[in-house]
Image (cartoon, grey):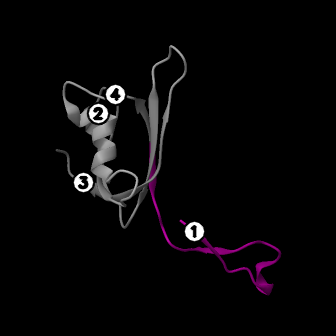
């Protein structure tokens, strides 16, 4: 949430704020796979889904935050986002990885268990 400064003469030298616009983002790192037995996990397919280098595509995001061995503590969320950062990294004789950051467009909604 953004801060909106409401400090005034009656604040006794303390900063006072109110809540402004809210936002959310998600970052993830994963192993790079150019082709996969199930192509839904291939990086190239993900890139193509976004429209390559010349398109701006909003994506639907579903998140699950698990509570460990006890599944009663699981939380599920969904919302729409834009990919604001996408990079591929790989060293010599090392497994390639990619990183992605998604910035939400609108509300991130808590959802019922699937």
Q: In this view, does 17 lie to the left or right of 61?
A: right
Q: Do the residues labelled 2 and 1 touch (CB within 8 Å)?
A: no
| Residue where numbered disc 1 is placed | 2
Circle 1: is it few (<14), some (14-19), or many (20+) Cα within 10 Å? few
* Residue 33 circle label: 4
State the mark number for residue 42.
2
Residue drawn 65% across and 74% down? 17
Sequence-first tag of 4 and 2: 4
Q: How many marks?
A: 4
The percent coordinates of residue 72 (x first, y second) are 26, 37
Calculate the distance from the C-alpha at mark 3 to the C-alpha at mark 1.
25 Å
Tell me the magenta residue range.
1-27
Is tag 3's residue or tag 2's residue first in the polypeptide sequence? 2
The verdict on residue 5 being magenta is: yes
Q: In the picture, residue 2 is in which quadrant?
A: bottom right
Residue at horizontal 45%, vertical 25%? Answer: 96
Find disc 3 in the rendering and name its residue. 111
Depth-wise, is mark 3 or mark 2 nearer the camera?
Answer: 2
- Element at label 2: loop
- Point out the residue furthest to the front here: 54
């Amino acid at each position: 949430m953004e801060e909106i400064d409401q400090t005034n003469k009656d604040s006794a030298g303390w900063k006072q704020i109110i809540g402004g616009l809210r936002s959310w983002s998600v970052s993830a790192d994963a192993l790079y796979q150019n082709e996969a037995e199930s192509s839904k996990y291939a990086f190239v397919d993900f890139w193509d889904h976004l429209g390559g280098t010349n398109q701006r595509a909003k994506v639907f995001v579903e998140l699950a935050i698990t509570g460990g061995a006890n599944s009663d503590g699981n939380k599920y969320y969904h919302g729409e986002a834009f990919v604001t950062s996408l990079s591929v990294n790989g060293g010599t004789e090392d497994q390639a990885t990619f990183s992605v950051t998604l910035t939400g467009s609108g509300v991130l909604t808590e959802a019922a268990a699937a």
